[in-house]
């Protein structure tokens, strides 16, 4: 994504953090499925707190957390104490502030250990990063809400783009978003509605973006040259485990560097690797 940490991701390589508005923060944890899901306020608030702490560069006190999420301080305190008891956050008695704890890492490690896509994608990404000197990423899509980086390989050279496993980005942003729009099986009116809420450095018009989506459908991969992040190119190819596309392999780098390698060359390589990975994941 970018030389700056704009993670919300990216996947793409770096983009702005998905920071929900104050009182809507808890809603960020809710899935946007058509089926009605009964809200559990304590759970959605706890998840909102964990996400806030994950985005914060420094530990936060109760009042800072409550203010950011629009929560009653006493309620916020009870939830933080419960999370601390489960070792998901830790409390510094001197500063009276909270931060994420190692229990979160244990949960993530357990998920990744059993994630067939992440395990199979990692050596592929390592090879791409080594061969081309680019950042290579494996992402998982959560409907049209967001994508999450679940596997990552960085180049050995000095210049690296800031992105980490666990980084979240809007699902339809950049090249990965074009793949999700083209191959995800989502209704176009909903895709278009969400597209209009995206933030880009160089925003495409709705007509141009739809043309880009159709180009991705025809080519089997997508290229975003400087639209999402100025000076950065993102190339993505879709991976389908079962049914519509749910994952993607992504390459991110400085536009000048990727242009020298060749966008078509990288795109065709990613498409072939993504196709092979799709077949392996389906057990074909």
Image: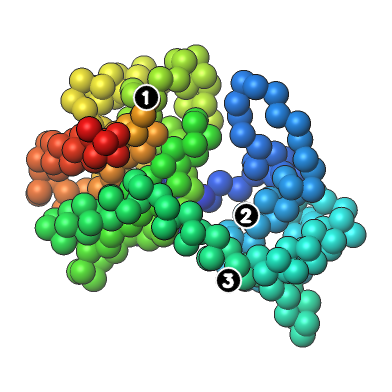
Q: CA distance from mark 3 to mark 1?
A: 35 Å
Q: Residues within 10 Å of mark 3 (few under 14, many from 20)?
A: few
Q: CA distance from mark 2 to mark 3?
A: 15 Å
Q: Is residue 279 left or right of residue 46?
A: left
Q: Nearer the viewer, residue 196 or 241?
A: 241
Which residue does the numbered mark 2 point to in the structure image?
51
First in residue order: circle 1 vs circle 2: 2
Q: Secondary structure at mark 1?
A: loop
Which residue does the numbered mark 1 point to in the structure image?
243
- The reply to whether dot 2 and dot 3 touch (C-beta < 8 Å) is no
Q: What residue lies at 65% left-to-right and 57% top-to-bottom?
A: 50
Is residue 63 shown to the viewer in this render? Answer: no
The percent position of residue 277, horizontal first and vertical second, equals: 24, 40
First in residue order: circle 2 vs circle 3: 2
Farthest residue to the right: give it. 74
Q: Nearer the viewer, residue 94 or 240?
A: 240
- The reply to whether dot 3 and dot 1 touch (C-beta < 8 Å) is no
Which residue does the numbered mark 3 point to in the structure image?
102
Mark 2 vs mark 3: give the one in front. 3
Mark 3 vs mark 1: give the one in front. 1
First in residue order: circle 3 vs circle 1: 3
The percent position of residue 10, horizontal first and vertical second, equals: 41, 48
Q: Residues within 10 Å of mark 2 (few under 14, many from 20)?
A: some
Q: What residue lies at 48% left-to-right and 54% top-to-bottom?
A: 111
Is residue 264 shown to the viewer in this render? Answer: yes
Q: Is residue 225 left or right of residue 151?
A: left
């Amino acid at each position: 994504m970018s030389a700056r940490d704009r993670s919300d991701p990216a996947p793409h390589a770096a983009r702005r953090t998905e920071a929900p508005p104050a009182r809507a923060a808890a809603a960020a944890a809710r899935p946007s499925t058509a089926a009605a899901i009964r809200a559990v306020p304590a759970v959605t608030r706890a998840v909102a707190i964990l996400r806030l702490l994950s985005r914060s560069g420094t530990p936060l006190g109760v009042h800072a957390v409550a203010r950011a999420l629009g929560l009653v301080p006493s309620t916020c305190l009870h939830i933080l104490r419960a999370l601390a008891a489960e070792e998901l956050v830790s409390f510094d008695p001197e500063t009276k502030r909270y931060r994420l704890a190692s229990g979160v890492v244990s949960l993530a490690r357990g998920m990744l250990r059993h994630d067939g896509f992440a395990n199979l994608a990692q050596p592929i990404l390592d090879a791409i990063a080594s061969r081309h000197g680019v950042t290579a990423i494996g992402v998982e899509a959560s409907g049209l809400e967001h994508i999450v980086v679940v596997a990552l390989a960085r180049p050995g050279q000095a210049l690296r783009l800031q992105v980490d496993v666990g980084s979240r980005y809007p699902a339809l942003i950049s090249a990965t978003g074009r793949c999700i729009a083209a191959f995800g099986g989502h209704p176009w009116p909903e895709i278009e509605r969400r597209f209009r809420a995206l933030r880009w450095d160089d925003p495409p018009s709705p007509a141009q973006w739809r043309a880009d989506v159709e180009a991705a459908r025809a080519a089997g991969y997508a290229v975003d040259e400087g639209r999402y992040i100025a000076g950065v190119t993102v190339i993505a190819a879709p991976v389908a485990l079962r049914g519509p596309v749910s994952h993607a392999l992504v390459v991110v780098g400085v536009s000048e560097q990727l242009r020298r390698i060749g966008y078509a060359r990288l795109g065709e390589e990613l498409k072939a690797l993504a196709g092979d990975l799709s077949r392996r994941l389906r057990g074909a």
